[in-house]
Amino acid sequence: MVKTQSSSILVLLILVVCNTHGSIYHVPEDFTSINAAIEQAAERDTILLEEGFYNEQVILDKSLTLASLYILDQDTTHIGATTLVGTDTLGSEGSTIRILQSEELNQVRIAGLRFIDAFVTGTSPDYGKGGAIFYYPDSLYGLDLLIDHNHFENNTADYGGAIYLSFANGTITHNTFVMNSAFLHGGACFLVRSDIDVTGNRFESNEAVQYVGGALQFSAS
């Protein structure tokens, strides 16, 4: 379901999600990889990526913030300079960030990052879903998710070229989606049984090749 919220509610949501009171880890200063930082992080910690290119698939299974230095100074040049490079993968497990259900997972923020060049495709029933970000819990688990101030470009999947979310709550806001594509549905985003507020984003030249939802598709099933 798409909702229109006031700016005050959005700010409150950002404060709630980001009120971590945890430690801050820097990659690569404190850890050489994003996954190594996540493995050592505790709930509510923040992982900050220094500017550069990151060529790894990230497995996110804890409540934390993953962001560039943008969240410290709101300098938008950090976004374009902090890049997660996707892979060319067959099947549904190749997304750049895979958010996995766990007892430690209930709130996640992904902010100020650039996602490019993921290519995640397959054949039924193992379709590629969410080139850049993927979340599909095993049960009705419910995740509060904030995806803000990111840039998604040239990501491809069968469903949700950039983002595929199922049974998630939260907000997708102030992101840019450029030239992402889905072979089936949801060129930029495919949202399934999710209560997501999509607001203040820019969509440009995204495409669903065979069916519908060049920018967005929402599904109740």
Image: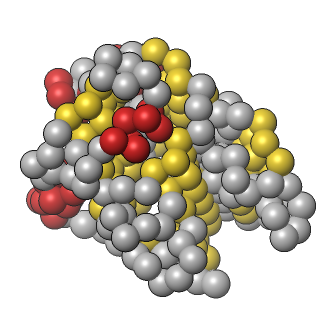
For the point 30% across and 23% down, the residue is 30
Q: In this view, which residue lies farthest toward the right?
A: 123
Please tell me which residue lies in front, 124 or 13: 124
Q: Quadrant of residue 112?
A: top left
Q: Position of residue 185 (x, y in %)?
A: 73, 62
| Nearer to me, 22 or 123 | 22
Q: How many marks?
A: 0
Looking at the image, residue 25 sits to the left or right of residue 15; the answer is: right
Quick one: quadrant of the C terminus?
bottom right
Please tell me whether residue 12 is drawn above or below residue 58 in the rendered image.
below
Quadrant location, the N terminus: bottom left
Q: Position of residue 202 (x, y in %)?
A: 46, 42
Q: Residue at point 18% right, 28% down?
A: 72
Q: Is residue 163 left or right of residue 22?
A: right
Relative vertical location of residue 134 with respect to residue 71 in this rendering, above or below:
below
Any part of residue 186 in sight = yes
Q: Position of residue 22 (x, y in %)?
A: 15, 46
In which quadrant of the rendered view does residue 164 lie? bottom right
Residue 203 in view of the camera? no
Query: At 43% from the left edge and 22% from the top edge, which residue is drawn?
Result: 32
Instruction: Tell me: 29 left or right of 154.
Output: left
- Which residue is most to the front? 40
* Residue at (78% x, 42% y) in the render: 89
Reply above or below: 122 against 141: above
Q: Residue 154 at x, y = what percent?
A: 67, 33
Q: How is the image coloured?
A: secondary structure
Residue 126 left/right relative to 101: right
